[in-house]
Image: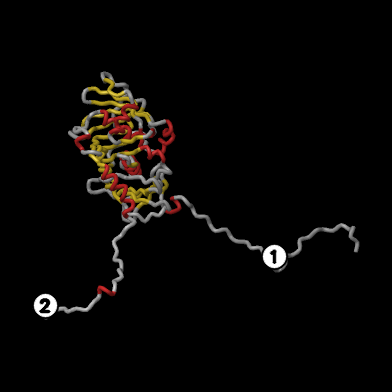
Amino acid sequence: VDGSGGGAVVSLPTYAFQRERYWLDAPSVAADASGLGMETLEHSLLGAAVPLAEGGQLFTGRISLETHPWLADHQVLGTVLVPPAALVELVIRVGDQVGCERVEELTLEAPLVLPEQGGVQIQVVVEEPDAAGLRPVAVYSRFEDATGSDDGVWSSHASGLLAAGESAAGGGVVLEQWPPVGAEVVMSDPEGFYAGLAERGFGYGPAFRGVEAVWRRGEEVFAQVRLPRERVGEVERFGVHPALLDAVVHAVASADFEQQPDVELGLGSVRVPFAWSGVRLHASGASVVRVRLARAGSDAVALEVADAEGQPVVSIESLALRPISAEQLQAARASRYDSLFQLDWQPVAVSASVVGGGSWAVVGPDV
């Protein structure tokens, strides 16, 4: 054999035990909401929307201290609550989604407590218009546990009505002159202002300490509110950032609009936003706002909110507050565990010593 001759290298066939498999790739399935027949929402608290078979729409989301850590800065009587302003923002957003520019009314029925671990699932349900053209809306939540289980019971937190109304772009009050002519400064120390609120039970952290100054002119109160720099990058994911809108409501405390001091509410009670009427969002993206407050009846205030140039952002025809106690918040916090219990009959072993003989008599007209 001539080993010096040149030759071509060829591939030998595989042997019996050298197998190769060629699998067809499975078709990919979209993992986002659109792949499940839902519409994806560009909102920080809501993720998807789906039309309901019998009419109306369902909007879903999930919040937790892990995904929204700034919510930990909103504590009332030692309990972390989702600010009422966040529920209003949710309803404003779904109203825009269904073509309703005005929140005709929204009543907050129960506080939404955030657990230290796990998350909270959110549902906002918008029904079909009634005979007057108003669309009922309701906000629900249920707790997840630390493992992500979602077997909890749904709780109702807010209900109200949405209205189409006129275009929100043309309404609102312009607040160009700032500070207002003739207004006197009544608060220029934010640290002292929030220290006073803390003594009353409102434990606001940096994300919610937005009130910078307050002025008064007769029965009108004006305030300047600024979203913290760390939160400014989030404004595009809201109509109005909940921390900013919540701080707007803080100005009510400085206005002395509450008829009764907190000491008359009982130990460990504070007033929180309860009923909103005539809420309209005129523009989004604001991080610094000017606020005008005025009485709207015996137990409510009206608010006009404008941006740094004085152009309308939000208008609220009426906002009423009501007292809430530490016991109510504790009950709301404990309710997440109630779903772990149920009533059931349990067999009990009976000792033979209690089963004995005896004499029995049955008495009755039919015996």
Residue 208: % across, % down: 36, 34
Marks 1 and 2 in Cβ contact (< 8 Å)? no
Secondary structure under badge 2? Answer: loop
Question: Looking at this rendering, what residue extends furthest in the top direction?
Answer: 182
* In the displayed structure image, the side of residue 2 where residue 104 appears, left or right: left
Which residue does the image show at 64% across and 63% down from the upper left? 21
Q: Is residue 343 above or below residue 272?
A: below
Residue 77 occupies quadrant: top left
Of the image marks 1 and 2, the number of the one nearer the N terminus: 1
Q: CA distance from mark 1 to mark 2?
A: 90 Å
Secondary structure under badge 1? Answer: loop
Residue 223 occupies quadrant: top left
Colouring style: secondary structure
| Foreground tag (1 vs 2) | 2
Q: Residues within 10 Å of mark 2 (few under 14, many from 20)?
A: few
Q: Which residue is mark 2?
A: 363
Q: Residues within 10 Å of mark 1 (few under 14, many from 20)?
A: few
Give the quadrant of the C terminus: bottom left
Residue 173 occupies quadrant: top left
Most foreground residue, 30 or 148: 148
Q: Amino acid at mark 1?
A: Gln
Q: Is residue 88 above or below residue 343?
A: above
Residue 264: % across, % down: 19, 36
Most foreground residue, 41 or 143: 143
Residue 263: % across, % down: 21, 34
Q: Which residue is mark 1?
A: 18
Give the quadrant of the N terminus: bottom right
Which residue does the image show at 30% across and 66% down from the upper left? 346
Q: Amino acid at mark 2?
A: Val
